């Protein structure tokens, strides 16, 4: 079976086990993961699906993810939705309730809702990390990936000054090679002229495959955006027939708040694989029973 066919199988399929075992073996032999005792099957399958079950590429992605977490503690160790509730309550971000025609999740970021005087770029970026961690748990998203709509209406010099080269590199890493998600498309709307220097800063760090998936729509985006998304997927504010963007943002904010505990567990865990904590607890219980 090829990678696409393997990806369609359920997590507990015996046909996935050779790939899961190979990735686990390779990961535990990696020098930088010498302190790690094990990885759960479900955690490894996220990385395998993201790279169509190519074990070598999946290992590279897993190591990049671990490295990114270690090198970005200012973001990765604080995944609390309540800590950024102020920006969430401005209707800054949503995951649309309906997937697109390919099955991809569709994310919307409304940059104009972010006031850079109140919220730093690092705090805003944490919102993206929280959403990414939550949707990577969805089997269908592991298979079909995601598409992102950035509405840049309201982008200002204050926003631009927040995006340093270091942060630009971190953002591009998550988009390209440090997170177990397939980015199927990036759509920019209402981009002003002075957004271009920021985009030029991020672009060199992106692989060619991602660059080819960037679509710039401008202010007259209704017709061109509809070439990629059917009306039931998009909110009316973007030419669609789905739920309004304000309600959709609030629904996703509520979902993040309901996920507070699991997000904090991921942030606190050395590898982000919180299932291994359960494995360890089960083994301790088993040992106590035997004793």
Image (tube, rainbow, N blue to C red):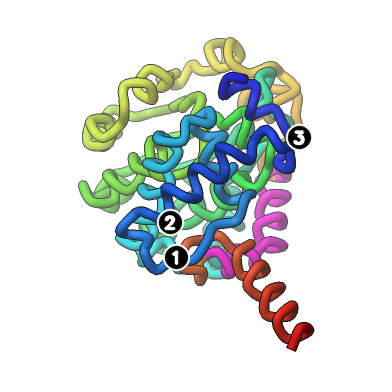
Q: Residues within 10 Å of mark 1 (few under 14, many from 20)?
A: few
The answer to whether residue 235 shows anywhere in this view is yes
Total tally of numbered discs in the picture: 3
**Residue at figure coordinates x 45%, y 44% from the top left:** 179
Q: Which residue is mark 2?
A: 28
* Image side of residue 13 versus residue 238, left or right: right
The answer to whether residue 261 shows anywhere in this view is no
Mark closer to the chain start, 2 or 3: 2
Mark closer to the chain start, 1 or 2: 2
**Residue at figure coordinates x 21%, y 47% from the top left:** 165
Residue 40 percent across, percent down from the top left: 60, 56
**Residue at figure coordinates x 53%, y 69% from the top left:** 83
The magenta-colored residue range is 247-266
* Image side of residue 275 versus residue 24, left or right: right
Residue 18 percent across, percent down from the top left: 59, 38
Q: Which residue is mark 1?
A: 36
């Amino acid at each position: 079976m090829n990678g696409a066919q393997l990806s369609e199988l359920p997590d507990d399929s015996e046909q996935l086990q050779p790939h899961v075992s190979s990735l686990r073996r390779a990961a535990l032999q990696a020098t930088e993961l010498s302190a790690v005792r094990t990885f759960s099957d479900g955690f490894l399958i996220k990385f395998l699906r993201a790279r169509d079950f190519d074990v070598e590429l999946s290992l590279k992605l897993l190591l990049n993810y671990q490295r990114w977490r270690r090198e970005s503690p200012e973001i990765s160790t604080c995944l609390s939705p309540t800590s950024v509730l102020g920006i969430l309550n401005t209707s800054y971000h949503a995951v649309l309730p309906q997937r697109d025609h390919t099955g991809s999740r569709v994310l919307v970021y409304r940059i104009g809702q972010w006031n850079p005087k109140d919220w730093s770029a690092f705090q805003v970026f944490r919102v993206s990390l929280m959403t990414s961690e939550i949707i990577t748990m969805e089997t269908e998203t592991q298979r079909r990936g995601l598409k992102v709509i950035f509405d840049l209406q309201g982008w200002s010099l204050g926003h631009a000054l927040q995006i340093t080269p270091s942060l630009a590199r971190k953002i591009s890493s998550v988009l390209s090679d440090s997170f177990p998600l397939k980015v199927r498309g990036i759509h920019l709307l209402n981009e002003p002229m002075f957004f271009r220097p920021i985009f030029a800063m991020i672009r060199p760090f992106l692989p060619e495959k991602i660059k080819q998936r960037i679509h710039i729509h401008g202010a007259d985006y209704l017709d061109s955006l509809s070439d990629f998304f059917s009306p039931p997927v998009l909110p009316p504010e973007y030419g669609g027939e789905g739920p309004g963007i304000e309600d959709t943002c609030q629904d996703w904010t509520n979902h993040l708040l309901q996920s507070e505990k699991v997000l904090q567990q991921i942030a606190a865990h050395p590898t982000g694989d919180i299932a291994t904590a359960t494995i360890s607890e089960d083994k301790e219980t088993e040992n106590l029973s035997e004793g």
